[in-house]
Image (cartoon, helix red, strand yellow):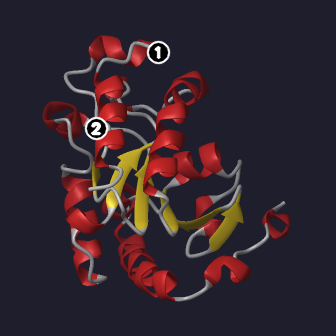
Amino acid sequence: MPGANELEKIAAEIVTCVKCPLHKNRANAVPGEGNPRAEVMLIGEAPGAEEDKQGRPFVGAAGRLLNEALEKAGFSREEVFITNIVKCRPPRNRVPTEDERRACLPYLHRQLEVIKPKIICLLGRTPLETLIGPYSISKMRGRTIEKDGWLFFLTYHPAAAIYNPSLKEQFLKDIQKLRELIHRDERRRGSSLDEFL
């Protein structure tokens, strides 16, 4: 399949990466997985304990909620591509530092260039801050933003919806909106960042 070999090459580099201190404590790096020609790419913050064990993204409790949301929206995990801003688990699941994010970003940018998704769904604050800017996820969730030629859709991280059940319904609705966005020409209707400044 076109792109699969290139993604495997990137994954091979990620699992042997030593560009930041996170590699010292990892069991497994987590490059990401899914369809090399996915129309939707979902990007979280970082692997957690279960992901570090298995070397796969979103396989713990947050992953189960993400799977439920994808299923309700008519997606299978196999048709989307799922990854994180950083590919190794930070100690005690802390937020990745700027240096750690910077070390991993070239891998993410290469994955984006290979997959060329129609929609990039950012799950939570860290992906939003890293790829868009220092904005509030609660103010921006449910919106599309066009930046650098990519169309981003913003929602909560599924872990936030687990810790705060009042967010779960919004999260599920947001993921359902992804299906509509694929079939609509949203590029002309992405929000301007000016309204959030």
Q: Secondary structure at mark 2?
A: helix
**Which residue in the rendered view is the most extreme toward the front?**
2
Please say if 178 is above or below 58.
below
Residue 72 lies in what quarter of the image?
A: bottom left
The amino acid type of the residue labelled 2 equals: Glu
Residue 155 seen in this snapshot: no
Q: Quadrant of the C terminus?
A: bottom right
The amino acid type of the residue labelled 1 equals: Cys
Counting every numbered tag in the picture gives 2
Residue 155: percent from left, percent from top:
50, 66
Please say if 28 is above or below 128.
above
Q: How dense is the environment of label 2, judged by Cα within 10 Å: few (below 14), some, or many (20 and up)? A: some
Residue at horizontal 67%, vertical 52%?
Answer: 132
Observer-side mark, 2 or 1, equals 2
Residue at horizontal 49%, vertical 55%?
Answer: 124
Q: Nearer the viewer, residue 81 or 49?
A: 81
Residue 164 lies in what quarter of the image?
A: bottom left
Mark 2 and mark 1: span between their CA atoms? 21 Å
Q: How dense is the environment of label 1, judged by Cα within 10 Å: few (below 14), some, or many (20 and up)? A: some
Q: Secondary structure at mark 1?
A: loop
Q: Quadrant of the N terminus?
A: bottom left
Residue 144: percent from left, percent from top:
62, 73
**Which residue in the rendered view is the most extreme toward the left?**
54
Residue at horizontal 42%, vertical 69%?
Answer: 39
Q: Label 2 belongs to which residue?
A: 8
Residue 62 seen in this snapshot: yes
Residue 172: percent from left, percent from top:
36, 77
Tell which circle, 2 or 1, labels the residue nearer the N-terminal end: 2
Residue 92: percent from left, percent from top:
33, 27
Q: Which mark is residue 20?
A: 1
Residue 171 lies in what quarter of the image?
A: bottom left
